[in-house]
Image: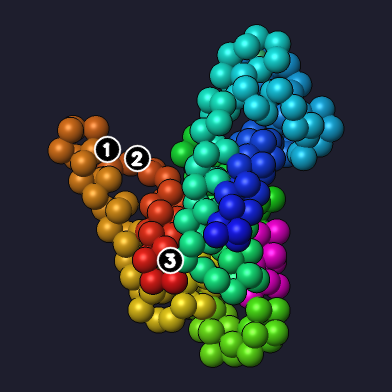
């Protein structure tokens, strides 16, 4: 239970940094509004993308106009703590758990950004891919889990290739989705082919259900771009929590 308590605590404490990452990466770095309040245009992140984790991040409100610029207090922290705790209950090798907790934390940031601006920024995806890859490679070598490691590497490459092919023939998929697919393929592939196939399929099924629901309530338009990352991440982590 100690590991679960540590995971919950760490998950809660990184919440403010996740808030800052969400706000800092909503817009591309070159955008004039980058780092500024979308309502009053005040510069909120004065010290670069890492920003200062303070009352701004914690309240989710602009310090100048007090309007909402992020999630309400404690929401991000509770989600992060909950996912980290659940992962710690199910996943035991410490390095693999660390890789999944990092991927989940980045996933929270990506879901929030994709849902609001339809972006999956490299500033979040690239370091996450590197950290998760390094942790899994070290876990594979240290714990003599070469078959899991090979599964992860092939899983990451296969999902990336599959999504890239889909992106070429469909308009709804972006290159960010392909990179996220590589990340999810890595972590799912560690646990085997069946979890990999189940996680990817569940992501597509959830997205299809969402589209169907929008059709039923008459809010669907063929030109509409839906954010895919939330469904990919929920599908993958649901399967991870079940099979790990
Ligand atoms: Zn403001």
Horizontally, residue 234 falls left or right of residue 110, namely left
The colour scheme applied to this rendered structure is rainbow
User: In this figure, which residue is indicated by the disc labeled 2?
Assistant: 224
Residue 25 among magenta residues: no
Quarter residue 136 falls in: bottom right
Residue 128 among magenta residues: yes
Residue 17 picture location, percent across and down: 69, 40
- Identify the mark nearer the N-term, 3 or 2: 2
> Magenta part of the protein: which range?
127-136
Residue 200 picture location, percent across and down: 38, 66
Residue 143 appears anywhere in the view: yes
Label 1 secondary element? loop
Which circle, 3 or 1, is nearer the viewer?
Answer: 3
Position of the N terminus, as image quadrant, is bottom right
Prevalent SS, magenta region: helix
Disc number at residue 127? none
Residue 139 picture location, percent across and down: 66, 79
Ligand 1 is located in which of the four quadrants? Answer: top right
Quarter residue 221 falls in: top left
Disc number at residue 240? 3
Residue 103 appears anywhere in the view: no
Q: Nearer the viewer, residue 220 or 59?
A: 59
Which circle, 3 or 2, is nearer the viewer?
Answer: 3
| Contact check, label 1 and label 2, Cβ < 8 Å | yes
The residue lying at 43 percent from left, 81 percent from top is: 192
Q: CA distance from mark 3 to mark 1?
A: 33 Å
Label 2 secondary element? loop
User: In this figure, which residue is indicated by the disc labeled 1?
Assistant: 221
In the image, residue 50 sits, relative to residue 195, either above or below, namely above
The residue lying at 59 percent from left, 52 percent from top is: 5
């Amino acid at each position: 239970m100690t590991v679960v308590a540590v995971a919950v605590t760490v998950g809660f404490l990184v919440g403010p940094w996740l808030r800052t990452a969400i706000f800092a990466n909503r817009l591309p770095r070159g955008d004039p509004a980058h780092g500024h309040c979308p309502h009053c245009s005040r510069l909120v992140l004065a010290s670069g993308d890492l920003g200062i984790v303070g009352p701004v991040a914690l309240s989710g409100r602009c310090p100048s106009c007090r309007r909402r610029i992020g999630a309400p207090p404690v929401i991000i922290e509770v989600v992060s703590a909950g996912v980290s705790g659940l992962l710690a209950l199910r996943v035991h090798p410490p390095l693999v758990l660390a890789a999944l907790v990092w991927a989940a934390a980045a996933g929270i940031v990506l879901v929030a950004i994709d849902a609001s601006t339809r972006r999956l920024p490299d500033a979040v995806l690239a370091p996450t891919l590197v950290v998760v890859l390094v942790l899994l490679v070290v876990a594979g070598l240290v714990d003599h889990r070469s078959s899991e490691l090979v599964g992860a590497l092939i899983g990451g490459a296969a999902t990336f290739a599959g999504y890239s092919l889909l992106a070429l023939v469909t308009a709804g998929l972006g290159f960010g989705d392909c990179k996220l697919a590589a990340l999810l393929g890595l972590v799912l592939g560690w646990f085997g082919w069946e979890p990999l196939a189940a996680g990817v399929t569940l992501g597509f099924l959830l997205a299809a259900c969402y589209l169907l629901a929008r059709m039923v309530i008459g809010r669907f338009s063929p030109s509409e771009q839906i954010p895919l990352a939330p469904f990919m991440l929920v599908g993958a982590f649901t399967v991870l929590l079940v099979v790990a």
